[in-house]
Image (cartoon, rainbow, N blue to C red):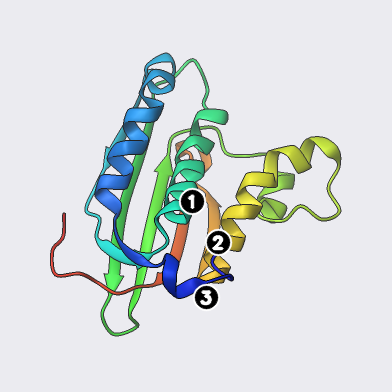
C-alpha cells in the first residue's frame, strides 16, 4: 500500500482513462447483468495508479455482486471537487440491491465478523485502508429501493483539465 516508498509511487492518474479500462474489463459481466457503467466528469489526481484502479474496480464491481437479475443494472461514477478544502469526492452509485443491513455498518471492517461476512467485506476493507492511507474517508449509503452510493473523499491535486 501507499505507506512504503510513498513519493516514488505517486503520479498523475487520469481517472476517466482508468474507469474506461475497468469498463472494458468488466463488459462481459455488465452484459450478463443487462447493466451499464456511466462515467461522468472525472479529473486527473496525484495518486498511486494501482491503488486507484483497485479502489474503483472494487466499488464498481460491488454492484454486480448485489445486482437483482430481474432488473437492469446502472452504475454511475462521477467526481466533484472543492477548491476551498482541496478535496475530491468520488461517487459510485448503483441500482443494485443494497448490501445486507448488518454489513452496512461493518462493510469496511473485517474484525469480529463470521466467515461469510468476512468474505463479503474483505476487498472493501482493503479499499478503506487505501483511502485512509491518503487521509481520506469512504462510506456506503443505502438509497432504499434505488440502490446504494459509495462516497470517497480524498485530498487531491486538481490538474487543469476535466476529462
Q: Residue furthest left?
A: 161
* Residue indicated by mark 2: 130
Q: Nearer the viewer, residue 74 or 30?
A: 30
Q: Position of residue 67 (x, y in %)?
A: 52, 27
N-terminal of the pair, mark 1 or mark 3, is 1
**Marks 1 & 3, CB-CB < 8 Å contact:** no
Q: Which quarter of the rendering shows the N terminus?
A: bottom right
User: Which residue is depicted at the point 29% across and 74% down?
Assistant: 157
What is the CA distance from the residue labelled 1 to the residue labelled 3? 15 Å
- Drawn side of residue 1 relative to residue 119, left or right: left
Q: Which quarter of the rendering shows the C terminus?
A: bottom left
Q: Is residue 157 above or below residue 13?
A: below
Mark 2 lies on a secondary structure that is: helix
User: Which residue is depicted at the point 43% across and 65% down?
Assistant: 9
* Residue indicated by mark 1: 55
| Residue 93 image-quadrant placement | top left
What is the CA distance from the residue labelled 1 to the residue labelled 2? 8 Å
N-terminal of the pair, mark 1 or mark 2, is 1
Q: Is residue 100 above or below residue 130?
A: above
| Label of residue 135 in the image | 3
- Drawn side of residue 127 relative to residue 41, left or right: right
N-terminal of the pair, mark 3 or mark 2, is 2
Q: Is residue 163 above or below residue 11?
A: above
Mark 3 lies on a secondary structure that is: loop
Q: Position of residue 88 (x, y in %)?
A: 35, 68
User: Which residue is depicted at the point 32% across and 46% down?
Assistant: 18
**Marks 1 & 2, CB-CB < 8 Å contact:** yes
Amino acid at each position: 500500500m501507499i505507506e512504503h516508498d510513498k513519493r516514488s509511487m505517486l503520479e498523475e492518474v487520469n481517472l476517466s482513462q482508468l474507469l474506461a479500462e475497468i469498463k472494458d474489463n468488466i463488459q462481459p459481466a455488465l452484459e450478463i447483468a443487462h447493466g451499464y457503467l456511466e462515467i461522468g466528469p472525472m479529473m486527473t489526481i496525484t495518486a498511486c495508479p494501482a491503488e486507484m484502479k483497485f479502489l474503483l474496480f472494487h466499488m464498481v464491481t460491488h454492484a454486480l455482486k448485489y445486482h437483482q437479475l430481474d432488473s437492469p443494472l446502472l452504475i454511475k461514477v462521477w467526481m466533484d471537487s472543492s477548491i476551498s478544502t482541496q478535496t475530491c469526492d468520488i461517487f459510485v452509485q448503483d441500482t443494485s440491491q443494497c448490501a445486507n443491513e448488518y454489513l452496512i455498518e461493518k462493510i469496511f471492517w473485517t474484525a469480529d465478523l463470521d466467515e461469510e461476512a468476512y468474505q463479503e467485506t474483505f476487498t472493501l476493507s482493503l479499499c478503506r485502508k487505501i483511502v485512509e492511507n491518503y487521509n481520506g474517508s469512504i462510506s456506503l449509503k443505502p438509497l432504499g429501493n434505488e440502490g446504494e452510493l459509495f462516497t470517497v473523499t480524498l485530498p487531491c491535486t486538481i490538474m487543469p483539465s476535466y476529462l
